[in-house]
Amino acid sequence: MKKIVILTGAGISAESGLGTFRDEGGLWAQHAIEDVATPEGFARDAQLVHDFYNARRANAAQAQPNAAHHALARLEAEHPGEVFIITQNVDALHERAGSRNVLHMHGQLDRALCGACGHRWDAPAVMRPEDACPACRVRATRPDVVWFGEIPYGMERIDPALSEADLFAAIGTSGQVFPAAAYGQHARRMGAHTVELNLEDSAASRDFDDCLRGKATEIVPLWVEGLLSRA
Ligand code: APR
């Protein structure tokens, strides 16, 4: 198993206390996507959107990486081949667990973006509509996260990675948001062995050769142990 590519979703951070989106009482049950996670919503009410991301930024800063994040960091450190994490999550728990080779395809809560000049910088704990961009001074600052209708980040790295993967795993994602939801199918078509580690079946489960079911903090460390003992 030379190259391992891993897609993670909100389920891997659930046991760190961060909400998922589509589970019972999830974030999309509490907030209308069109109001807090679209460019149109931001244009309509920037304060509402900043409030939403300020709250998530504060939660994410308080959260601790869990055994699943640590297991993936161990895999990267000990596996003889490349381990590449493509995360849909905007928290920094993979990095805080020690993972280095991480791509945030939906952006990061810890980063800010200027809608006017494209400048990026480390986000302050609280962002406000009246904040001026540190580079161009225009009051067009926003969280550096990918909203619905926008292009995910890193696509130029993701497609080659899926083609070169010997093993592709999806962890804690419901398989309902594209393009990530098709990555298992794509990797399998390109010859990878595919594994889904999730609490329950997802919309993409049929794309996976193996499906491991359970809580991420339980099944991910066992899965990593198995990979490293066979390496
Ligand atoms: N362990 C493992 N899996 C879990 C756990 C857990 N403790 N808790 C929940 N899950 C699973 C759920 O069963 C579900 O399949 O994690 C998945 C979470 O799915 P979503 O809430 O849809 O999150 P995600 O798939 O990451 O959403 C993708 O949608 O709204 C956008 O940009 C947002 O990145 C997000 C994208």
Image (cartoon, helix red, strand yellow):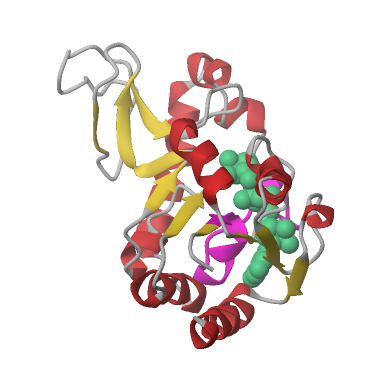
Q: In this rendered view, identify the residue nearer to me: 30 or 106.
A: 106
User: In the figure, residue 110 lies in which quadrant?
Assistant: top left
Res. 88 in view: no
Is 77 rendered above or below residue 152? below
Which quadrant of the picture is home to ligand 1? bottom right
Stretch of the chain drawn in magenta: 6-30
Is 39 rendered above or below residue 13? above
Give the percent coordinates (x, y) of residue 184: 69, 50
At horizontal 21% and vertical 20% (from top left) the residue drawn is 133
Give the percent coordinates (x, y) of residue 46: 45, 22
Side of 99 where 123 appears, left or right: left
Give the percent coordinates (x, y) of residue 198: 70, 66
Side of 115 where 36 appears, left or right: right
Side of 81 where 202 appears, left or right: right
Most extreme residue toward the bottom, as rendered? 229
Q: In this rendered view, identify the residue nearer to me: 101 or 191.
A: 191
User: In the figure, residue 230 lies in which quadrant?
Assistant: bottom right
Q: In this rendered view, identify the residue nearer to me: 11 or 187.
A: 187
Give the percent coordinates (x, y) of residue 219: 63, 79
Is 104 rendered above or below residue 198? above
Residue 230 is one of the magenta-drawn residues = no
Residue 10 is one of the magenta-drawn residues = yes
Res. 96 in view: yes
At horizontal 31% and vertical 11% (from top left) the residue drawn is 116
